Amino acid sequence: MLHDLWRVPVVVAPMAGGPSTPELIIAAGGAGALGFLAAGYKTAEAMAGEIEAVRQETDRPFGVNVFVPQLPESEPEVVAAYVASLEPDASRLGVACGEPSWDDDHWNAKIEALLADPPAIVSFTFGCPPAEIVAALRAAGATVAVTVTTPEEAEEAVSAGAECLCLQGFEAGAHRGSFANDDRAGQDWGLLALIAGVGRATDVPLIAAGGIAGPSDVAAVLAAGAVAAQVGTAFLRCPESGAHPAHKAALADPGFTTTAITRAFSGRRARGLVNRFMREHPGAPAAYPQINNATRPLRAAAAGGGDAGGMSLWAGQGFRAAEERPAGEIVERLARGAEHRSR
Amino acid sequence: MLHDLWRVPVVVAPMAGGPSTPELIIAAGGAGALGFLAAGYKTAEAMAGEIEAVRQETDRPFGVNVFVPQLPESEPEVVAAYVASLEPDASRLGVACGEPSWDDDHWNAKIEALLADPPAIVSFTFGCPPAEIVAALRAAGATVAVTVTTPEEAEEAVSAGAECLCLQGFEAGAHRGSFANDDRAGQDWGLLALIAGVGRATDVPLIAAGGIAGPSDVAAVLAAGAVAAQVGTAFLRCPESGAHPAHKAALADPGFTTTAITRAFSGRRARGLVNRFMREHPGAPAAYPQINNATRPLRAAAAGGGDAGGMSLWAGQGFRAAEERPAGEIVERLARGAEHRSR
């Protein structure tokens, strides 16, 4: 069933916050890959508008990724103290920090919209949806995938009815899809070990994500047992990507040499290029989306000024391979890693 | 040249502190893999004795791994404070903490012994040896490999003359081979991203290590571009392994569910099964081998009492696949992952 979703086993990862435009998903589908719209940070109406925009241009199947909301983790005073520590940045940028408010990212409205008019596949990130929602989406005709980062999360997702798992290795760019926003020891699994560990426990098909940037990486995860490779960062510099120009430029800037995981921007662990803001704010508490809301004006002002040091420059460990080429060409290049398997 | 060192592209990792017995190296070679003696924590004489023991039983090539010493990192007061925090553990075990002394692990004597009578390959861990030592070992007839954990370390090792790199992904069990014992952001690379990142920068052959525990993992790292897979944890439970019985048992104990990186036992970052000692001592400073020397009596007493909660249970992320089988059988199983490549 999954194999009907792509001609080549490449998934263009959902990248919320701008990069995943309808154009990127259309280009991915045109090249035989499976693209995902990113519903995160959007209203249900905006999500539906993007679904419509893709459908007007292509008959290829595509997916939609939805963030699963979580109850607030940290005490308001802890959050407030962190936000206060950002004041010097805010005043330098001439803005005020945003309200560190909690929200559920329009969860119910999105699920209703997807049930009413489902795309080919719906994937979830930041948690496992209730089994009833999984069952309802499947009954409505969508394949349901859950993003997991550990064998334990994989077990929970399969129990809830997930037909497919997106395994996100620790190498992956942007937010960790972990169900819990905590600091427990041992939660970060490398992609290869995660494929093997989850593969021992379940027969559900596995899409592998994290640091995959070239055809040899695709070949590697298929050899490890995945059915497809999910790739995000390698598409960030495409003309179809809506990533900010300063973000695109930073990915190719030799001044950025490595990535790390931080809560500085959003209150949730996410991997990005190591930059000034990340270095200057190492102590952010687990408070998503409160801190994401608080830093939004700062990130917007930094982006407006082209100041990469103050932006969240999400990137996976394979970022150095990201090229400024049309998405279709990148899909073709990645697909070469799958060729020996179909011969 | 490297390919003369093995019949199957499997390297049995050096595992200092007990597991890497001459018997394990002999069995590895007999099955066509390349085994490594672990010179770490030993005198040069003990190392030479093991080399001799292997040679008496086999003509197969084998390697020796040597720890590169580093100057002390942390202030003595910081080290003393951590050691003082271990007193309750020590008194419960009825022992005293060891002296947190620095040593160079008999560096000069080992290099002299290896120059005088070199094995087929010498690998280094915890740093890059000076170019003169690399050149001298090569002139003496040994292949020289350096363990690296980042693209930057890889560049330094190749500049120093390394003919081969052992890429250690973040998934790997036991000590990180990082050149520096610090906490800089972005130092932990997943194995796949590391192979791709280093492969873009150098043509030196790459041996991949970290979380590799089954044939599909071997197939994956070969597909990613490595010339061989280095595997440690999967051999810990072999009869030929000198790992402590409580360590062997813990690897198969469902009570241990994950691994994490800690400085608690040695003052250097190392991955092991998450256990009581690791959880109770999260704040160890960067001070190797001082803290390793301080905790030695505690670890020995815990091991003597079969208390896995107080031992350093080094293990990579693939630990769950470790089987209690002869090493030769495990080599054979892993080698199946390389079969499609020679067809």
Image (cartoon, coloured by chain):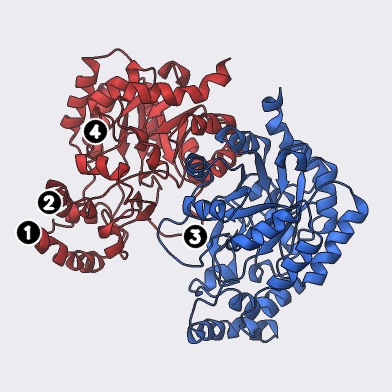
Chain colours: A red, B blue
Q: Are marks 1 and 2 in contact (CB under 8 Å)?
A: yes
- The circle on residue A94 is 1
Q: Quadrant of the N terminus of chain B?
A: top right
Residue nearest the observer in this picture, A144 or A82: A82
* Residue positioned 26% across, 21% down in the render: A117
Residue count near mark 1 (Cα–Cα under 10 Å), binned few <14, some 14–19, many ≥20: few
Which is closer to the viewer, label 1 or label 4?
A: 1
Q: Is residue A142 visible?
A: no
Report the amino acid beneath label 1. Gly
The residue beneath circle 4 is A110
Tell me the CA gap for discs 2 and 3: 35 Å
Report the amino acid beneath label 2. Ala
Looking at the image, tell me whether mark 4 or mark 2 is earlier in sequence order.
4
Which is closer to the viewer, label 3 or label 1?
A: 1
Which is closer to the viewer, label 4 or label 3?
A: 3
Which is closer to the viewer, label 4 or label 2?
A: 2
Q: Are marks 1 and 2 on the same chain?
A: yes
Residue nearest the observer in this picture, B301 or B57: B57
The residue beneath circle 3 is A185
The residue beneath circle 2 is A301
Residue count near mark 2 (Cα–Cα under 10 Å), binned few <14, some 14–19, many ≥20: some
Q: Quadrant of residue A224?
A: top right
Secondary structure found at label 3: loop
- The circle on residue B41 is none
Secondary structure found at label 2: helix
Report the amino acid beneath label 4. Lys
Q: Are marks 3 and 1 on the same chain?
A: yes
Residue A179: x and y in percent read 40, 48
> Which residue is at the far right?
B56
Q: Provide the chain ID for the residue under circle 2.
A: A
Looking at the image, tell me whether mark 4 or mark 3 is earlier in sequence order.
4
Secondary structure found at label 4: helix
